[in-house]
């Protein structure tokens, strides 16, 4: 049976829609792999272990799904946030980046932390949270044409080592602990103007270096951070590139060189704060 997915919106920002989970009968089984991904100019389709098929129809701007057997609640959350919503947001003309977003204190603005998987985005984000900052989203950031955030997901995923560093309980259910860090929805929209790309170096480095990126180099450095860049269709990638080129002039982009170690987290945070409040 084919059904339509109901998503929820709060104000002008999309939120994690836990309510939609009530429409499903879940099993305890976790999905292990995506069997097939299909995409062309009119649809994007994901087949999860022959248990369910999710498709987005571009011409109708709607999602549909077929479920052949039960999937776990965690599997549904992963499918929704990792694959379905990003495609939907891209089709809306919004820029979707693999990043974390943090609200600056007393400024009305927010900033982003970007970089490849494993460089410490979530760890640094959690350290900002411990210092009193409000985290808008971890892993995925969505910006509209005015550089305002359109996605709110106040969770941070920390590795076992990061949990140990912050003395956070690690349950070992997954390779990363999912931590709820805010129960208060921010009604006020925040503009995101400053982006910091984490770029660790192999050699020993005593000082943290923050360097501005200007002109076409902004596009070159931000392109690898398109969300799901490895599986999105050429059509979606073109839309993302068009949106990035449109709003890049509104963004201040910086690259941070540092030696990757937990002792540097607070130094990186202070270096970013120095740019934010200069």
Image (tube, helix red, strand yellow):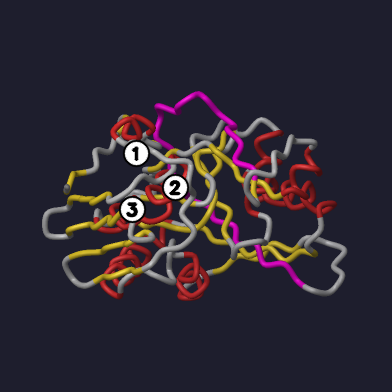
Residue 188 is at least partly visible in this image: yes
Q: Is residue 26 above or below residue 22?
A: below
The residue positioned 87% from the left and 70% from the top of the image is 204
Give the number of the disc on residue 14. Answer: 1
Image location of residue 150, percent across then percent down? 36, 43
Q: Nearer the viewer, mark 3 or mark 1?
A: 3
Range covered by the magenta-colored residues? 177-201
45 sits to left or right of 32: left
Label 2 – label 3 distance at C-alpha: 12 Å
Is residue 148 located in the magenta-colored stretch of the structure? no
Residue named by callout 3 = 84
Image location of residue 109, percent across then percent down? 49, 40
Sequence-earlier tag: 2 or 3:
2
Residue 111 is at least partly visible in this image: no
Image location of residue 216, percent across then percent down? 46, 75
Number of labels in the image equals 3
Sequence-earlier tag: 2 or 1:
1
**Residue 78 or 173: which is nearer the viewer?**
173
- Density class for disc 3 (Cα within 10 Å; few <14, some 14-19, many ≥20) is many
- Density class for disc 2 (Cα within 10 Å; few <14, some 14-19, many ≥20) is some
The residue positioned 61% from the left and 45% from the top of the image is 157
Asked if the residues shown at circle 2 and circle 1 are in contact, with their CB atoms under 8 angstroms apart, the answer is: no
258 sits to left or right of 186: right
SS assignment at label 1: strand
264 sits to left or right of 87: right
Residue named by callout 2 = 75
Q: Is residue 72 above or below residue 208?
A: above
Is residue 186 located in the magenta-colored stretch of the structure? yes
The residue positioned 66% from the left and 30% from the top of the image is 132
């Amino acid at each position: 049976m084919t059904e339509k997915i109901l998503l929820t919106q709060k104000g002008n920002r999309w939120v994690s829609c836990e309510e939609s989970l009530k429409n499903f009968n879940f099993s305890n089984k976790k999905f292990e792999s995506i069997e097939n991904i299909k995409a062309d100019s009119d649809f994007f389709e994901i087949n999860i272990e022959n248990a369910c098929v999710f498709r987005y129809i571009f011409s109708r701007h709607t999602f549909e799904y077929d479920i052949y057997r039960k999937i776990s609640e965690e599997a549904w959350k992963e499918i929704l946030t990792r694959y379905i919503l990003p495609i939907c947001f891209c089709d809306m003309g919004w820029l979707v980046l693999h990043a974390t977003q943090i609200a600056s204190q007393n400024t009305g603005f927010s900033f982003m932390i970007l970089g490849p998987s494993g460089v410490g985005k979530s760890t640094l984000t959690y350290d900002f949270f411990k210092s009193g900052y409000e985290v808008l989203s971890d892993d995925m950031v969505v910006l509209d044409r005015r550089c305002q955030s359109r996605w709110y997901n106040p969770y941070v995923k920390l590795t076992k080592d990061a949990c140990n560093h912050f003395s956070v309980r690690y349950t070992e259910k997954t390779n990363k602990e999912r931590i709820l860090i805010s129960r208060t929805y921010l009604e006020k929209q925040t503009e995101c103007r400053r982006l910091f790309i984490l770029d660790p170096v192999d050699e020993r480095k005593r000082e943290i270096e923050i360097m501005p990126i200007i002109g076409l180099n902004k596009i070159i450095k931000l392109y690898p951070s398109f969300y799901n860049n490895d599986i999105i269709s050429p059509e979606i990638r073109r839309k993302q590139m068009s949106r990035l080129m449109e709003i890049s002039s509104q963004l201040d982009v910086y690259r941070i060189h540092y030696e990757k170690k937990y002792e540097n987290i607070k130094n990186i945070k202070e270096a970013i704060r120095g740019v934010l409040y200069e």
